[in-house]
Amino acid sequence: MDEVSARRLRNVIPVLTEQRSVLADAGLSFAGHLLDLTIMQLRLSLNDISEDELSEFSDQVSLGLVGKNSSDKNPVGR
């Protein structure tokens, strides 16, 4: 992606974020969620993050959350 295209896409993100807020205020949560996905996809593209990298990151975060929740429920030494 050339710099001009990247700059244009970066300029779109704040507009989409603002529109997402408008949708949320109107109670249109599903439409807001779709804009969230669009914003995320733009950010992934701009930062050259692949779907595989995102999936791996998500898996690691999920494992961390599961591990944290398990240790909260079964504290050692109590």
Image (tube, rainbow, N blue to C red):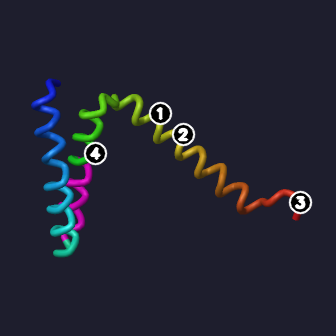
Residue linked to disc 3: 77
Q: Secondary structure at mark 3?
A: loop
Q: Is residue 66 above or below residue 20?
A: above
Q: Quadrant of residue 27?
A: bottom left
For the stretch drawn in magenta, what is the main secondary structure? helix
* CB-based contact (under 8 Å), mark 3 and mark 1: no
Where is residue 67? Give x, y as percent: 66, 49
Q: Quadrant of residue 72?
A: bottom right
Question: Which residue is pictured at 65% across the width and 57% down the height?
Answer: 69
Q: Secondary structure at mark 4?
A: helix
**Which of the two discs, 2 and 4, labels the residue nearer the N terminus?**
4
Residue linked to disc 1: 56
Question: Which residue is pictured at 21% across the width and 54% down the height?
Answer: 34
At label 3, counting other C-alpha atoms closer than 10 Å, the crowd grade (few under 14, some 14-19, many 20 or more) is few
For residue 66, side relative to residue 28 (left or right): right
Question: Which residue is pictured at 10% across the width and 31% down the height?
Answer: 4
Give the extent of the magenta segment: 28-37
* CB-based contact (under 8 Å), mark 2 and mark 1: yes
Residue linked to disc 2: 60
For residue 7, side relative to residue 71 (left or right): left
Residue linked to disc 4: 40
